[in-house]
Amino acid sequence: MKLVMAIIRPFRLDDVRMALSRLQVEGLTVSEVRGYGRQRGQTEIYRGAEYAINFQPKIKIEAAVDDGRAETVVEAIQQAARTGRIGDGKIFVFDIAQTVRIRTGEINAAAI
């Protein structure tokens, strides 16, 4: 099993969710996060005062999928989240050693 974690722009969340729904990805965790990458934040002017925004608002999406579906899920997220501008985000794929459904005690693939 794999854990696919994606950091995306907030306004792309609905597009990514719909793309994953079409692939029948059943479980999804979404978190509001802040961070920066190569763009290192930005400087803005508000009411005549200049200030730096060091951390950009982002959305973190996490989904556990079977090994065979991980690449398809990554491609779907990439297509749905891409705007072509700096700051579109990143996708990370991790191996999952074990998964347990708390309610029933099912493990691994049955617990997804």
Image (cartoon, rainbow, N blue to C red):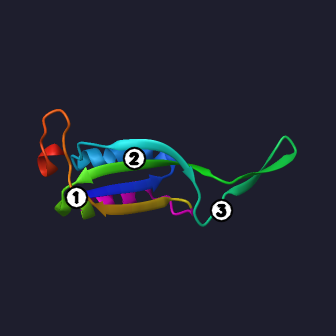
Foreground label between 3 and 1:
1
Distance from Cα at disc 2 to Cα at disc 3? 26 Å
Disc number placed over residue 97 in the picture, else none: 1
**Residue 73: in magenta span:** yes
Q: Is residue 75 visible?
A: no
Q: Is residue 66 left or right of residue 48?
A: left
Q: Is residue 34 left or right of residue 49?
A: left
- Kindly check if marks 3 and 1 are in contact, taking CB atoms under 8 A apart as contact: no
Q: Position of residue 77 (x, y in %)?
A: 36, 56
Amino acid beneath label 3: Arg
Give the mark nearer the N terminus: 2 vs 3: 2
Q: Helix, strand, or loop for circle 1? A: loop
Local crowd at mark 2 within 10 Å, few (<14), some, or many (≥20)? Answer: some
Q: Helix, strand, or loop for circle 3? A: loop
The residue pinned by badge 2 equals 15
Q: Position of residue 21 (x, y in %)?
A: 27, 44
Give the mark nearer the N terminus: 2 vs 1: 2
Q: Helix, strand, or loop for circle 2? A: helix
Q: Is residue 49 left or right of residue 17?
A: right
In this rendered view, identify the residue nearer to me: 99 or 79: 99
Residue 10 to residue 84: above or below: above
Amino acid beneath label 2: Asp
Distance from Cα at disc 2 to Cα at disc 1? 30 Å
Q: Is residue 111 visible?
A: yes
The residue pinned by badge 3 equals 40
Q: Which residues are magenta?
A: 72-86
Give the mark nearer the N terminus: 3 vs 1: 3
Q: For the C terminus, which image quadrant?
A: top left
Distance from Cα at disc 3 to Cα at disc 1? 34 Å
In this rendered view, identify the residue nearer to me: 51 or 19: 51
Q: Position of residue 51 (x, y in %)?
A: 79, 50
